Image (cartoon, coloured by chain):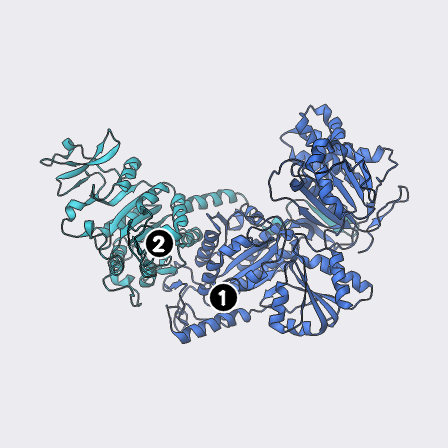
Amino acid sequence: MNEMTTIARTTTLKDWETDQEVRWCPGCGDYAILKAVQRTLPEIGAVPENTVFISGIGCSSRFPYYMETYGFHTIHGRAPAFATGLKLANPNLDVWIITGDGDGLSIGGNHTMHLIRRNLDCQIMLFNNEIYGLTKGQYSPTSRVGTTSPSTPYGSIDRPAQPAAFALGAGARFVARGFDVSKELPNVLKAAHAHKGAAFIEIFQNCIVYNKDVFEDFAAPKGAEDRQLWLKHGEPMLFAKGTRGIALDSDALTLKTVDVVDGDWQAAGVIVHDVTNRSVAHMLVEMRFGAFPMALGVLYDDPRPTFEADVVRQNKAASEGKTADLQSLLKKGQTWTVTEGGPEL
Amino acid sequence: MATAVEDRADKRQSPLSDAVVVRFAGDSGDGMQLTGGQFTLSSALAGNDFATFPDFPAEIRAPQGTLFGVSAFQINFGSSAIDTAGDAPDVLVAMNPAALKTNVPQLKQGGLIIADEGEFNDRNLAKAKYDANPLDDGSLAKWQLLKLNISQLTMDAVKPFGLGNKEALRCKNMWTLGLSLWMFDRDRAPLIEWLNGKFAKDPNLAAANVAALNAGHAYGETAELAGPLKQHHVDPAPADPGLYRTLTGAEGIALGLVAGTQLAKLPMFFGGYPITPASAILHHLSRLKEYDVTTFQAEDEIAAICSAIGASYGGSLGVTSSSGPGIALKGEAMGLAIMTELPLVIVNSQRGGPSTGLPTKTEQSDLYQAVYGRNGDAPMPVVAARSPGDAFECAIEAVRIAVQYMTPVMLLTDGYIANAAEPWKVPDLASYQAFPVEFLTEVPEGGFKPYGRDENLKRPWVKPGTPGLLHRIGGIEKEIDTGHINYNPSNHQAMTDLRKEKIDGIKVPDQIVELGAEGGKLAVVGWGSTFGPIHQAVRRKRAEGKDVSHIHIRHIWPLPANLGDLLKSFDTVIVPEMNTGQLKTVLRDQYLVDAKPVNKVSGQPFTIAEIEAAIEGALA
């Protein structure tokens, strides 16, 4: 988020749509994410001309063309670097980075890491569909072991990266998860926007052509209660309609699932979610789906000073009391004057 | 070159007969660059024109005494115009056997060797792979040899200050500098002032260094030497009255970029990543925050250029800088800047290649990379600096082209220019014409077209944050005017043509002839840091009555409009360059002229003699 977006101006979803024909495959999860963003921006009072969407390359990276804002569709993996330069040039802009699992974690993993480490004030939406869609279906760094694809006809071998764990490990001060068709997604986006600093959001996104329904095991509406843990600050980590919860196994120093009897979650030792607790955040991002429900919502949120603000502060401090007199700078150092009589100091 | 040394009647006869070239050589840790730098200042204050050549190893602290750990600093100074750091030294100061071994072959026959015999012990001789002590075995007979135990003399001089052995020996370079100052009749006062300033926090150390400097000077003055040590006085070179300073290429680039952005009335954003020999530009700029300069040390070369493009998109002038390997990494992003038509300056401080190559040695082998080195038809202007002072002018020119045509511009310099120093007459900034940028801030008549164009074919520059002009840009082919994605065959043809036409149409000054006539028997065509040796060689040959002219190209792309006709007015064209013939190929391609290559890729600049030989060969 940033200061300028607090200037109130009423917009509607329509104000954020461009006249460009959306070219994703029919049924792609990207449509739902696009709508969620277009629905969210009016609600947070965002101002179109102060909003910039920056993307890399991939299906998700077409996103800026469909947003009636400023937008920059850059090169593969490098959106964070463009965002850094832009934000340093104008810290007042509200910058959203759109990336994917290949763009942001493979070719651009380095930039994602450093953007997060520096804590540039922006929102990073990483669309994770566990596949390279735009290049026709090769396995990606988040694909599960054994994924068959044109480049891995006998199944992929390498272990997948975990985006949220990667972000937290890189020093993220905000980590959230959502999925394309979730009704909660706008709330996650709002929280990310409200966070001053690099806000990392992993969005599970269904690629209906190359990796169809790969998230159905937790995203399917049926039985979702049992498989999704929506985290809310200050509330106990409950799922399965409050009949189960997440507790700390203090012997093993891990999380465990516990049954909650008669709603007495305290008796069951269920943890109350504190978004500023970094230790618990580390356990949440590592919590394996299957043995546990999928942790969704804001996993961690604890702001600290942002990169661009610190740069501005240092530039200002270093300039204090100095004038930008280039002519005198040119004369600085050891100089001498040549006169008709020869040189002198 | 005119004789620069004038013997003084009351002094012993000078053995030197031409311009004075002194080379200080020692171990990386001996402080030779510092000695050379201060001797340079002293030359400036004596009113001599000069050129320097710092020649140091890639290793930061190479093992002591080794051949590859030798660091040297060469200065050519005289009473007339000096264009190069000199071919062969007249004086070699060798602080150890390794320094002698690696540098003595270049010493002029009959030249003077000053060697610190205190360092010529068995251990150091073995490290330098000498079987016998060259100071004693007569192998240096074709030169004049002055053996001094500089180590011991320094220790004696600084004894009163109670320094440890190691610290005392560190003053050796100041002793040597003192002797050199005496040799060339120089004033010690500015150096003493400098030492007192440098060691202000440790007055004892300052005093010790001053004592060493004075002792070296006194040694020259008082020692009864029947040997080769004599004093010379080099008269001041004629120079335009005005304020002067020494300037390295890295300083020239940094100051020129600041001047350029001030003339454009833009803030500067500099994204860089450490690489030799380009880092010095980042270092200089990072201290200039008050000039509306933001510097950013990125995580890699790609992020450095991408952040600069992002800043240009935001309304700053984005600048990035690197050397060959880093420039290669930036290639894709340059293509994006070309496609999105955003201003950007990319500085390439060339070094020996390919791959890691010779990081601290100079070469001009990135010309193809600059002109052609991108995927797709990706035309981009290229400007090349010839000297540190010229780097200042070229940086301003690069900024001008970038903002007036909305294009990335490559500014070529090289390791030699980056590190070398020359006297520079401080320019009057008021004499430069400003070229303030006008951003588009509201919908123009006829509607807003993100890819609409003015008479220069330049598209409008719109800062995000501007109401009413929202639009999207990117690397996919743009539709004419609207900038929307467009894969249409005819549109791609038209846009490719437009991008080419825009760059071809950049107005650059007509090519001038630096020296000689605008036509005749032979043109020596150069670019970049070969200016000095070409200029001197052509001057000498012209003094001999030869029909030869010097043409030096600053605008590598697009080339000056008159260049083709100019080249065709010569019977022969030779192109000396520190590569295997890159400008030569471009000239042949552009003008169908039979330009002949003269190539050197040893990591060392051309000598004047080499260019003279090439001229002789071409005229034969």
Left or right? Give the position of A30 relative to B54: left
Left or right? Give the position of B177 relative to B201: right
Residue B333 sits above or below residue B123 on the image: below
Residue A160 locus on image (x, y percent): 32, 47
Q: Colour of chain B?
A: blue
Residue B36 sits above or below residue A136 on the image: above
Residue B454 locus on image (x, y percent): 48, 71
Q: Amino acid at mark 1?
A: Ala
Say if residue A97 shows up in the picture: no
* Tag 1 residue: B378
Please give the letter of the chain rendered in cyan. A
Q: Nearer the viewer, residue B124 or B76?
A: B124
Q: What's the residue at 62%, 73% (across, down)?
A: B591
Left or right? Give the position of A75 relative to B349: left
Neighbor class of circle 1 (other Cα within 10 Å; few <14, some 14-19, many 20+) is some
Residue B287 sits above or below residue B133 on the image: below
- Residue farthest to the left, as pictured: A262
Helix, strand or loop for disc 1 = loop
* Tag 2 residue: A102
- Residue farthest to the bottom, as pictured: B490
Residue B294 locus on image (x, y percent): 49, 49
Q: Nearer the viewer, residue B348 or B362?
A: B362
Q: Nearer the viewer, residue A95 or A97?
A: A97
